Amino acid sequence: DAGITQSPRHKVTETGTPVTLRCHQTENHRYMYWYRQDPGHGLRLIHYSYGVKDTDKGEVSDGYSVSRSKTEDFLLTLESATSSQTSVYFCAISDSEETQYFGPGTRLLVL
Amino acid sequence: GQNIDQPTEMTATEGAIVQINCTYQTSGFNGLFWYQQHAGEAPTFLSYNVLDGLEEKGRFSSFLSRSKGYSYLLLKELQMKDSASYLCAVSGGSYIPTFGRGTSLIVHP
């Protein structure tokens, strides 16, 4: 299994609070991604990174920001959490276009 | 844009064969992925098709027709542990996969 971890694995927070999710890899892969997965929508890309300090927006980036200051870490921040951001968040890594390896996921509940 | 369609749910019997279809309309095409995802777990990679034809990996095979915008995942000798969601994803011009909504497969004894 690819060395990819996410923290926290579960979080409950209140509307309006900032939340930061962390993705950490030990594979030295260039590309890192944040997805959210919701019933009826499948996996949707939030942001991705193609190198240190190089990031770009995905399909559902509103309300989210990311940072990548080191190859191994990709942070996702919900600037002011809303109930619509209750979801399961997956981080993924890749070193080519031929596959992605997914982390275990973070379950976020915004009350 | 990208549009990827797959059935929402399928049921099958243990020991049987099931085919999960995926159709797509995308701006650019580099390859098509299939992932398996058990409930409460992360997706895991099954296959990546770039060229037309059938690729076999044990009990699982994946087929691609680029001219028809069509793929299927074939699962043989179904086992109870194959009950999962199967995600079709297409890599387009940006090389970033876009995922379909997934097909939930239920295998009955």
Image: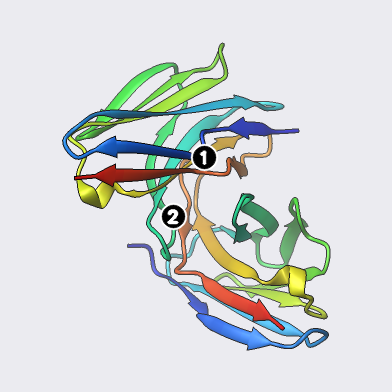
Q: Which disc, if any, is residue B71?
A: none
Could you tell me which chain the residue with mark 2 belongs to? B
Residue bearing mark 1:
B8
Is A99 on the left or on the right of A110, as rendered? left
Mark 2 residue crowding within 10 angstroms, few (<14) / some (14–19) / many (20+): many
Residue A64 location (% of width, % of height): 78, 69
Amino acid beneath label 1: Thr
Q: Which of pointers 2 and 1 indicates the residue nearer the eye? A: 1
Residue at the spot 64% in from the left edge and 79% down from the top edge: A109
Q: Quadrant of residue B56?
A: top left
Looking at the rendered structure, whether the residues under marks 2 and 1 are on a common chain is answered as yes
Viewer can see residue B13: yes
Q: Distance between the residues labelled 2 and 1?
A: 17 Å
Of B1 and A22, which appears nearest the observer? B1
At mark 1, the secondary structure is loop
Q: Quadrant of residue B42?
A: bottom left
Residue A25 location (% of width, % of height): 48, 71
Is B102 on the left or on the right of B106, as rendered? right
Task: Pick whichever of labels 2 and 1 is earlier in the sequence.
Answer: 1
Is A49 on the left or on the right of A61, as rendered? left
Amino acid beneath label 2: Pro
Of B78 and A4, which appears nearest the observer? B78
Residue at the spot 50% in from the left edge and 69% down from the top edge: A105
At mark 2, the secondary structure is loop
Residue A69 location (% of width, % of height): 67, 75
Q: Which disc, if any, is residue B43?
A: 2
